[in-house]
């Protein structure tokens, strides 16, 4: 039974969004618009692994698929973490916080592409298909194209969602097994991008289910045209987009350019108008260019060193403490971040609500670290692998240099670290399998909720996913689970504060730094915003 009043859970997670809700059931009365004849070229840092958002976890993938091709039931506002209506124009939450009823937007069209021509508009069938594919191991499409859904499972949504039901063509009901305070924030995340059930059926009949990852179809602002690996991705503006006036480009081109210095040169030559991830050394020259703008803001991110606690000797707390204490983090911040980083002490950034300001972290002390190793039974040290990311990220602009500095620091206490690296996709795959002893990695927040840090990076459910250290500690995990089930933000803050203190005592990873995020753009670009959640998006962006 639909509730007439939003519960407290809904007020906490979506009150601001409800204020912006359109009239329920009102059709979108707009025809296909002619788009401005403008092309924007984005110098991106790498090739996406694919175009099926539910499979992936990186900003490279999400920029190339989620915020171009797709929409979600609820969405993050541009440049922020507030949730607003998306393909659902409103929603109700039951008094017990376990039933979410979404009222879908009318008149939304799926994109027409060379490989698909829709015969109907978006409706409840598409929502049910999207989530049933992730929930049901026996889903027909999932059997034809078996893949993993790391975010969905890492966040425990496969266990949280009991069922997803079509009430009528424009109403969908989600029933949860227990209340979940971050649920609406989570539903705005990339994995929840809505797929076309009609397109999926077409692919199944043709025996080409895997094409959903190569030839994407959504309701979003840009229509996928072509992809040449390591070279370009081409999109056309969607003239049928359901948000009138939001698409201000006729063409969007990703120029895939892994070398940051080459991205800078392309930007200066106007071969691209937006670039990703400038190196710290390039910040000053870019700021000095009269044709460029360089907005910046404190990063909603964390670069850290993960310890695989299932591997000896990293299962010993004294060993992790010694390795952490031996790292000269101040020197790393000066050399790697070059003035664009702040020392990290917590498993989340200071801008995240519930951040515990009392945590100070261990001081740099090589002599004490060596004594701790001796106490742990390693007076002569040991050998270990130290994995260095092959890619540049805002949270770690130079992982190789950071690894070399840590290697030198550890050598002083008798620990011989062998630096290992792989191609990015292989790096993540092998890390998920737990092949590393220690690894450099990081995180940019996905949804503005503390659970996205503490649960996703450190929870027991995430041990085969983004919890790279395989750390499952029941006292910590119990606090995370309890915090998910209460709608009271003060109570959640108390629980997350306790969890951060346990983290500091157990040290499953060493926080290194939070970085400042810069977004270099041509002055011809209008209203490009820095996204705190780590991707780039081009709806609402125009060119002079």
Image: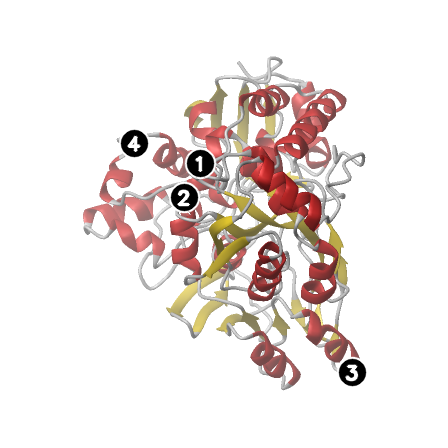
Circles 4, 1 touching at the beta carbon (< 8 Å): no
Q: Tally the marks.
A: 4
Q: Which residue is mark 1?
A: 310
First in sequence: mark 4 vs mark 3: 4
Residue 166: which disc? none
Q: Residues within 10 Å of mark 2 (few under 14, many from 20)?
A: many
In this view, the mark in front (1 or 2): 1
**In terms of secondary structure, where does tag 4 sit?**
loop
Q: Which mark is residue 290?
A: 3
Helix, strand or loop at disc 3?
loop
Residue corresponding to mark 4: 137
30 lies above or below 82: below
The CA distance from mark 3 to mark 2 is 47 Å
Mark 1: which secondary structure? Answer: loop
What is the spatial separation of the Cα atoms under label 3 and label 1, in whole angstroms?
A: 52 Å
- Give the CA distance from mark 4 to mark 1: 29 Å
Determine contact: label 1, label 2, CB under 8 Å: yes
- Counting residues from the start of the chain, the first of labels 4 and 1 encountered is 4
Q: CA distance from mark 1 to mark 2?
A: 8 Å
Measuring from the top left, give residue 341's x and y in whole percent: 74, 58
- Tell me which label, 4 or 2, sits earlier in the chain: 4
Judging by the rendered image, the residue that carries numbered circle 2 is 434
Q: Disc 2 on helix, strand or loop?
A: loop
Going 39% across and 68% down the picture, which residue do you hit?
227
Residue 190 appears in the figure:
yes
Q: Residue at x 68, y 41 (%)?
A: 348
Tell me whether the residue at label 3 lies in contact with that at label 2, contact meaning CB atoms closer than 8 angstroms. Answer: no
Classify residue 133 by image quadrant: top left
Q: Which one is in front in this view, the residue at disc 4 or the one at disc 2?
A: 2
């Amino acid at each position: 039974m639909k509730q007439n009043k939003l519960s407290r859970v809904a007020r906490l997670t979506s009150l601001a969004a409800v204020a912006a809700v359109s009239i329920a059931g009102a059709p979108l009365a707009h025809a296909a618009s002619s788009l401005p004849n403008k092309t924007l070229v984005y110098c991106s840092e790498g090739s996406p692994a694919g175009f099926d958002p539910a499979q992936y976890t990186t900003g490279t993938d999400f920029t190339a698929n989620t915020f171009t091709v797709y929409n979600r039931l609820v969405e993050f506002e541009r440049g922020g973490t507030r949730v607003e209506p998306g393909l659902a124009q409103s929603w109700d939450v039951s008094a017990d916080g376990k039933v979410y009823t979404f009222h879908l937007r009318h008149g939304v069209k799926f994109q027409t592409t060379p490989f698909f021509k829709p015969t109907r508009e978006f409706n409840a069938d598409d929502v049910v298909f999207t989530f049933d594919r992730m929930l049901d191991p026996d889903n027909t499409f999932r059997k034809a194209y078996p893949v993993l859904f790391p975010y969905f499972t890492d966040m425990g949504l496969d266990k949280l969602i009991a069922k997803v039901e079509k009430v009528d063509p424009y109403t969908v009901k989600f029933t949860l097994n227990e209340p979940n305070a971050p649920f609406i924030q989570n539903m705005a995340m990339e994995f929840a991008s809505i797929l076309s059930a009609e397109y999926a059926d077409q692919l199944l009949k043709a025996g080409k289910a895997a094409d959903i990852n190569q030839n994407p179809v959504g309701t979003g602002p840009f229509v996928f045209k072509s992809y040449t690996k390591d070279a370009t991705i081409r999109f056309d503006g969607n003239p049928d987009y359901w948000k009138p006036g939001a698409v201000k480009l006729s063409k969007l081109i990703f120029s895939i350019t892994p070398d940051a210095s080459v991205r800078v040169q392309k930007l200066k030559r106007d071969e691209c108008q937006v670039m990703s991830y400038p190196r710290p050394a390039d910040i000053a020259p870019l700021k000095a260019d009269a044709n460029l703008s360089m907005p910046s803001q404190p990063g909603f991110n964390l670069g850290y060193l993960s310890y695989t606690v299932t591997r000896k000797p990293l299962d010993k707390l004294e060993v992790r403490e010694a390795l952490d204490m031996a790292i000269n983090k101040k020197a790393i911040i000066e050399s790697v971040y070059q003035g664009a980083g702040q020392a990290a002490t917590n498993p989340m950034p200071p801008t995240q609500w519930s951040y515990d300001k009392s945590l100070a972290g261990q001081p740099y002390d090589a002599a004490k670290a060596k004594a701790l190793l001796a106490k742990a039974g390693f007076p002569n040290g040991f050998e270990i692998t130290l994995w260095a990311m092959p890619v540049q990220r805002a949270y770690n602009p130079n992982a190789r240099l950071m690894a070399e500095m840590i290697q030198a620091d550890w050598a002083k206490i008798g620990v011989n670290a062998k630096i290992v690296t792989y191609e990015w996709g292989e790096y993540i795959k092998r890390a998920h399998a737990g092949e590393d002893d220690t690894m450099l990695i990081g995180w940019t927040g996905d949804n503005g909720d503390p659970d996205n840090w503490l649960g996703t990076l450190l929870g027991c459910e995430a041990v085969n996913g983004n919890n790279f250290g395989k750390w499952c500690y029941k006292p910590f995990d119990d606090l995370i689970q309890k915090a998910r089930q209460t709608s009271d933000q003060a109570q959640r803050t108390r629980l997350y504060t306790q969890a951060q203190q346990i983290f500091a005592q157990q040290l499953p990873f060493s926080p290194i730094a939070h970085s400042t995020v810069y977004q270099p753009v041509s002055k011809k670009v209008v209203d490009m915003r820095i996204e705190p959640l780590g991707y780039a998006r081009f709806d609402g962006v125009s060119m002079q």
